[in-house]
């Protein structure tokens, strides 16, 4: 059914009709206000007449009739929607450009088709597996929503489903485009460097703009529909995206490394054949893995960060700056999308460019986007962030609330915050600026620790001269050190956000941090373009290796084969660099989003239920935050447990890679026994390995998925809300450190190997090279499976905690206000499922046992 | 079925086979069992060549197809002092097989002495396998090693010159970049000794090289000879190998060795 839906959506005519209907719908909503809310002049929204149960009444699209929203604000929201749609149209335009490009020879097309089929099969299988789970969770969310209002129940559950579908769509389309673009890049490399580079980058931009467009569209639509009561729906939307991203990351990570390690173990180690040798049955699966891991996984991961940061900013914005605090992040995102559209289009390369100039062009694109965004932020802030100096921003003002502005008056803000204009508050803009700078700084730190031109990787390559152990030891040192650098950068960003709001209630600081996240992901379009470019170039190189006909090309034009291969190798190198750089942003954004969500978590505990969050006073928030101290034993216990979870999660994933790789080794060995395959007369059965990877990746993601979803629930029901708070704090801290360590150590080992292969310390085949290969093999599952999967883990656990918090407050065994038996049963069920997951992660598969028997014989 | 005659250098053997060089190279490198592997170097020999060497008389008798009609992959005719008995003139093309059985065939060409280096590094393949540094060019080296008047000599020799990088002209060069040899310090010391003692033309750096020699380190080509009679098998440049013999070159670079 879903495939039919996709086919329908991809149909050009229906696409146009769909977009036209959407546009008409919103224009109608805008002008026909009485249909959706009260007539002008009547109050609605939170200030609307109370319902029979004493809660504020709710109407969809109430903001259109709420006098609090000016005509200009409503127009601005429509413009944001328009920008989101423009982003999607830009993606469509680029996709058409990519698809129209030359597809190369039939041999190249056959290889690309095999990769594409494998990638499609993987995502279809994953959707078949996850689809029912999404359905079940949607139903659970509907029935567990605390509010009695059907609109909120539907909002949370429906938004969850939409968030999940959007996340899957970003991954699916991104990967589909990548598997289309790789062939075109390989074909274009036969003619010109610039053409190949541009095609590769634009392939990535399609995914980037899709992420931008869908993320902005979702957040804006929810706000337009629910107004200031969008909390439930926003959480659902964020959770849907996050959960899908976790599965995409985990499944993709297991797939890519199982295929890679399996291909290498049999191909390179046992048979001594080169990478991408067509006789190796795992070659296609390896290329598919690059797409499902680096493309679909990363795109879904960034998409969820994009969603979660906007969710956090909108929730906190409402509790601090009122409706302006909600609309501002949406407008900022709109500017970011515009910046990405303009700047990604400027990335171009000439026919005779090199890696360095191409990389410079990509970086220039990022700089142009940053400048456009920053100028836009300041202009927007200057025009929009003006407050009436006579009133305090918080509705339920308490003595602490007046700390929002010095002496309660916005006009008393220092000059750096109001630029000398009474009533102007540029602090949200400044925190966005911090976010943009943070993204650039994280890029630089990651680049420093993982790029071949810097001391850490050079040192690692040098250490390879003295053997395998010294390389591993040095790699650990580089990885550990890099975590400190990343933590310092993130801590400085949070500190600067805090300084912007110095003297104000903590919720404002949390809003500042959330806006830092918004700023950081402003150029998501550029970031994902850079990331997806990596696997596209990598795959194009593989297609060149397997699909170019060297002799025919040389006959046609002397030196053309070598020239084209050199272009592909250069593009691969550029792609490796850009891909590595974006990993820092993915991890950083996860931390910033988690910190923002943590503030929402405290806010919900403070008021006892998520539906009352809009009525929270700062005093309540400060009182609750003060209870989260490690001096409290339950908090400390939660802190320890939370700190341990990322380690257990990583262990499960790494074991899963090992298990899946063994199955692939077995299959490849079986196929190599066929003399015709070995001699190159017969094509191996690539599909068989692709099937093994697909099925094992699906099977293996159940355990880590259970761990991510059920652990916070078990901790919350068993140990109470304080312990759950500690649990989240511990998990964010160790999760971030572990993710950075694994990503950077793995990246450094990988590039140390590349440095040696480029002719240093003995070059290919030397003892140093052997040691470097060992380091790279150790680092592979760290950097491509466990490390990246920790980003969504952090956010999933935060989201699950937030969503379950209402029930945890009621039913937990320590401070629960309702039947504790319910809490006990839920906790025990969750603990049993987690125990089963751990047991599953350690078992040996039947195939592995069979292999061991074979070795013993 | 056509019978091919090959002189294998590692291990030294005279082998008759129904397999053409590409198939024979793959067979030698990977065998028929799944875990068998290893580089192989072998010369073509004309099986119809007139020779008093007894194994030649056995070719037709022993190299017969299997009972089921399948070709005979290898019939070992001799495994000891083979190179010694095969005339240099009888050596045809040289085939270099990689670990996974890709074969590069080299034709003999007129010898031209290298002029751009003061020091040379030679890897002997047959009949013994030391690695030697020398001030002699390949032709002089061959003459010297096969000269019966010197106390230590071999009747014939097959060897290749290996890359020395910047060390070929500058002993103290710090940049050894792409040289994969283990014990580089010892190699440098050996070169220094040659430099210090002009009367000493050769110095052994490794007595017996057991690992595969990395094909990418072969510089100039492979030589086989006796006295003044020298056959030179030039190896194409890396750029030519990459474009004209891509699969072989890619495979050769995927190997580990010394």
Image (cartoon, rainbow, N blue to C red):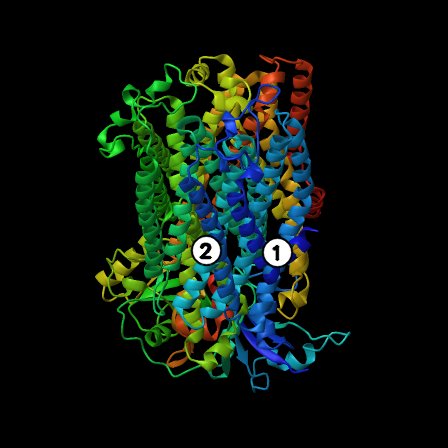
Quadrant of the image containing the N terminus of chain B: bottom right
Q: Are marks 2 and 1 on the same chain?
A: yes
Residue drawn at x 49%, y 31% as measured from the top left = A228
Query: Can you give x and y, in whole percent of width and height, for residue A207 in the image?
Result: 50, 53
Rendering coords of residue A579 (x, y %): 43, 50
Label annotation for residue A806: none
Secondary element type, mark 1: helix
Pick the front one: A220 or A744: A220
Q: Nearer the viewer, residue A319 or B136?
A: A319
Q: Residues within 10 Å of mark 2 (few under 14, many from 20)?
A: many
Which residue is at a point 64% across and 28% down the rendered structure image? A834
The image position of residue A264, as x and y in percent, is: 55, 53
Say few, some or many: other residues with alpha carbon within 10 Å of mark 1 (under 14 / 14 to 19 / 20 or more).
some
* Residue at position x 58%, y 39% in the image: A35
Q: Is residue A831 above or below residue B161?
A: above
Q: Residue A625: which quarter of the image?
A: top left
Position of residue A46 relative to residue A621, above or below, is below
Left or right: A502 in relation to B215:
left
């Amino acid at each position: 059914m879903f495939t039919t839906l996709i086919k329908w959506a991809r149909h050009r005519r229906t696409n146009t009709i769909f977009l036209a209907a959407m546009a008409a719908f919103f224009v109608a909503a805008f002008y026909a206000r009485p249909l959706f809310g009260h007539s002008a002049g009547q109050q609605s929204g939170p200030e609307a007449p109370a319902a029979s149960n004493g809660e504020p009444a709710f109407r969809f699209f109430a903001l259109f009739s709420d006098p609090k929203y000016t005509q200009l604000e409503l127009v601005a929201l429509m413009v944001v929607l328009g920008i989101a749609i423009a982003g999607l149209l830009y993606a469509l335009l680029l996709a058409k450009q990519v698809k129209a490009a030359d597809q190369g020879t039939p041999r190249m097309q056959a290889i690309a088709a095999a990769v594409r089929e494998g990638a499609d099969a993987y995502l279809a299988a994953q959707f078949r597996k996850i689809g029912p789970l999404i359905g079940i969770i949607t139903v659970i969310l509907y029935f567990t929503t605390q509010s009695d209002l059907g609109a909120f129940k539907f909002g949370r559950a429906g938004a969850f489903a939409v968030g999940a579908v959007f996340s899957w769509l970003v991954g699916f389309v991104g990967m589909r485009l990548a598997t289309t673009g790789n062939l075109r890049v390989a074909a274009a490399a036969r003619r010109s460097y610039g053409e190949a580079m541009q095609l590769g980058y634009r392939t990535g931009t399609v995914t980037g703009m899709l992420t931008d467009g869908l993320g902005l569209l979702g957040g804006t639509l929810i706000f337009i529909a629910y107004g200031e009561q969008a909390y439930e729906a926003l959480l659902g939307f964020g959770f849907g995206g996050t959960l899908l991203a976790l599965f995409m990351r985990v499944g993709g990570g297991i797939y890519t490394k199982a295929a890679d390690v399996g291909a290498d173990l049999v191909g390179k180690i046992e048979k001594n054949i080169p990478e991408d040798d067509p006789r190796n049955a795992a070659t296609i699966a390896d290329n598919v893995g690059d797409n499902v891991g680096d493309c679909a996984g990363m795109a879904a991961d960034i998409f969820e960060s994009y969603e979660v940061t906007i969710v956090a900013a909108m929730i906190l914005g409402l509790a601090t700056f009122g409706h302006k605090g909600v609309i501002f992040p949406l407008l900022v995102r709109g500017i970011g999308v515009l910046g990405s559209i303009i700047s990604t289009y400027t990335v171009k390369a000439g026919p005779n460019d090199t890696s360095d100039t191409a990389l410079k062009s990509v970086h220039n694109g990022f700089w142009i986007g940053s400048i456009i965004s920053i100028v836009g932020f300041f202009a927007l802030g200057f025009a929009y962030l003006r407050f009436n100096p006579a009133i305090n921003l918080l509705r339920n003002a308490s003595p602490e609330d007046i700390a929002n502005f010095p002496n309660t008056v916005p006009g008393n803000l220092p000059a750096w915050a109001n630029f000398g204009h009474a009533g102007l508050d540029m602090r949200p803009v400044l925190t966005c600026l911090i976010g943009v700078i943070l993204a650039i700084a994280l890029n630089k730190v990651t680049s420093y620790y993982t790029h071949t031109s810097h001391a850490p990787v050079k040192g690692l390559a040098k250490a390879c001269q003295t053997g395998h152990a010294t390389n591993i030891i040095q790699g650990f040192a580089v990885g550990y050190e890099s975590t400190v650098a990343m933590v310092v950068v993130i801590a400085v960003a949070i500190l600067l956000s805090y300084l912007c709001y110095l003297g104000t209630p903590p919720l404002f600081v949390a809003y500042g941090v959330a806006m830092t996240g918004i700023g950081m992901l402003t150029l998501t379009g550029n970031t994902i373009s850079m990331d997806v470019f990596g696997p596209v170039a990598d795959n194009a190189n593989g297609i060149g290796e397997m699909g170019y006909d060297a002799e025919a090309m040389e006959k046609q034009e002397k030196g053309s084969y070598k020239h084209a291969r050199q272009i592909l190798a250069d593009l691969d190198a550029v792609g490796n660099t850009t891909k590595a750089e974006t990993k820092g942003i993915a991890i950083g954004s996860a931390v910033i989003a988690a910190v923002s969500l943590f503030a929402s978590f405290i806010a919900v505990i403070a008021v006892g239920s998520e539906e009352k969050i809009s009525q929270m006073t700062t005093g309540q928030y400060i009182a609750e935050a003060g209870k989260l101290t490690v001096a409290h034993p339950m908090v400390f216990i939660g802190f320890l447990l939370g700190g341990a979870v990322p380690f257990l999660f990583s262990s499960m994933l790494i074991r899963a890679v090992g298990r899946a790789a063994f199955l692939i080794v077995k299959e490849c060995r079986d196929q190599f026994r066929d003399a015709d395959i070995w001699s190159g007369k017969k094509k191996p059965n690539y599909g068989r390995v692709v099937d093994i990877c697909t099925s094992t990746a699906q099977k293996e993601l159940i355990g880590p998925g259970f761990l991510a979803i059920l652990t916070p629930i078990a901790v919350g029901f068993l140990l109470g809300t304080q312990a759950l708070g500690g649990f989240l704090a511990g998990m964010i801290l160790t999760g971030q450190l572990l993710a950075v360590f694994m990503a950077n150590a793995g990246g450094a080992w990988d590039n140390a190997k590349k440095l040696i292969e480029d002719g240093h310390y003995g070059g290919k085949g030397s003892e140093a090279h052997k040691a470097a290969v060992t380091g790279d093999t150790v680092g592979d599952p760290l950097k491509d499976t466990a490390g990246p999967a920790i980003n969504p883990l952090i956010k999933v656990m935060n989201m699950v905690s937030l969503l379950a918090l209402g029930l945890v407050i009621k039913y937990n065994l320590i401070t629960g206000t309702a039947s504790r038996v319910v809490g006990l049963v839920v906790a025990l069920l969750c603990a049993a499922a987690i125990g089963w997951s751990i047991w599953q992660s350690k078992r040996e598969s039947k195939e592995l046992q069979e292999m061991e028997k074979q070795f013993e014989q | 079925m056509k019978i091919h005659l090959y002189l294998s250098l590692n291990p030294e053997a005279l082998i008759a086979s129904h397999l053409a060089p590409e198939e024979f190279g793959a067979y030698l490198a990977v065998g028929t069992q799944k875990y068998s592997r290893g580089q192989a170097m072998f010369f073509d020999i004309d099986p119809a060549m007139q020779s008093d060497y007894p194994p030649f008389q056995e070719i037709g008798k022993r190299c017969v197809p299997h009972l089921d009609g399948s070709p005979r992959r290898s019939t070992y005719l001799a495994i000891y002092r083979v190179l010694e008995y095969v005339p240099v003139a009888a050596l045809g093309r040289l085939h270099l097989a990689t670990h996974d059985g890709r074969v590069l065939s080299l034709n003999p060409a007129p010898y031209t002495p290298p002029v751009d280096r003061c020091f040379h590094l030679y890897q002997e393949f047959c009949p013994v396998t030391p690695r030697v540094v020398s001030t002699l060019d390949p032709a002089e080296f061959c003459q010297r090693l096969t000269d019966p008047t010197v106390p230590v000599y071999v009747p014939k020799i097959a060897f290749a010159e290996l890359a020395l990088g910047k060390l070929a002209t500058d002993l103290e060069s710090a940049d050894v970049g792409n040289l994969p040899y283990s014990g580089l310090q010892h190699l440098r010391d050996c070169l220094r000794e040659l430099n210090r003692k002009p009367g000493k033309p050769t110095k052994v750096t490794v007595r017996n090289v057991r690992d595969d020699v990395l094909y990418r380190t072969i510089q100039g080509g492979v030589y086989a000879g006796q006295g003044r009679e020298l056959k030179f098998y030039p190896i194409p440049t890396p750029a030519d190998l990459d474009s004209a013999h891509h699969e072989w070159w890619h495979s050769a670079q995927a190997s580990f060795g010394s």
